[in-house]
Image: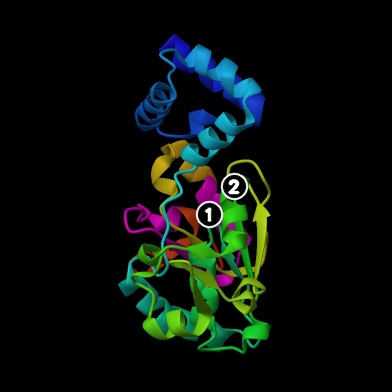
Amino acid sequence: MGQYEDFKKNIYSLINVDLNSYKEKQMKRRITSLAKRNGFDSLNEYYLKLKTDKELLDQFINYLTINVSEFYRNPSQWKILEQNIIPELINERKRPLKIWSSACSTGEEPYSLVMLLTKFYNLEDIKILATDIDLQAIEKAKDGVYNEKALANLPKDFVDKYFEKVDGSYKISSKIKRAVEFKKLDLLKDPFPTGMDLIICRNVLIYFTNEAKDKLYKKFYSSLSDQGIFFVGSTEQILLPEQYGFKSVRTFFYKKMTKL
């Protein structure tokens, strides 16, 4: 136990990531298994190597941030987004929507959003903010090259229109890429953008402690515009959303109430 406590402190001083905010049992198991896979039986030895080996440290950060993503993940939820959420938001606001993909991983989610929004706006009028703590994931997102599996749920007309097949992979159109602004952002530490009409934070909150989630819900509330929508992952429904100023409007979709 002491070794993991020391490891958490050391990692905080090394990369400013607070492992106390993640569910302990889950994260400790993941880190111990990664250390073993790299040939380290002790977390102390693993940490000493992380300090001097940039490649190993990049691998650690990448593993820590659990980058599992695909286009149109949970297609039924994207249908609700298309048929209900976005039309309602557009109807209430007579300007282009401000949208934030808050744990964008390797780019599948923000690029899916851009393609979906082409049904409502001209492509040149679409701008999505996409952030992640993992710079490696952001670089991969900027490259915009994906395997066939990642595109399995994406409507075929989007694949045909916005991707080019290159050596067995699929390269996304530069027109779609231009609509996304990628930035590094640590959800737990960094200030959030404000005035967002739609925030997507899916399959991330599940890894955090209840205390960390409590803090994040409050930050997301402040980040949204009045009547803005917060879209969460399939295993991340908010218990008693009213205590954070949210009202459930559809499963996994929460509206910011104007008064807490």
The residue lying at 37 percent from left, 26 percent from top is 33
- Amino acid type at circle 2 is Gln
Residue closest to the eye, 8 or 241: 8
The residue lying at 53 percent from left, 70 percent from top is 171
Residue 256 appears in the figure:
no
Q: What stretch is highlighted in magenta?
A: 216-243
Residue closest to the eye, 81 or 133: 133
Q: Residues within 10 Å of mark 2 (few under 14, many from 20)?
A: some
Which residue matches tag 1? Answer: 103
Q: In which quarter of the image is residue 198?
A: bottom right
Residue 238 spot, x, y in % from top left:
38, 54
| 2 falls in the magenta region | no
The residue lying at 53 percent from left, 82 percent from top is 117
Circle number at residue 161: none
Q: Is residue 40 above or below residue 125?
A: above
Query: Tag 2 or tag 1, which sits nearer the N-term?
Result: 1
Q: Which residue is at the far front?
A: 167
The reply, left or right, for residue 163 in relation to residue 207 is right
Across the whole image, how many numbered discs are drawn on residues? 2
Residue 224 spot, x, y in % from top left:
59, 64
Q: In this view, does 38 lie above or below 115?
A: above
Which residue matches tag 2? Answer: 136
Q: In this view, does 179 lie above or below 15?
A: below
The residue tagged with tag 2: helix, strand or loop?
Answer: helix
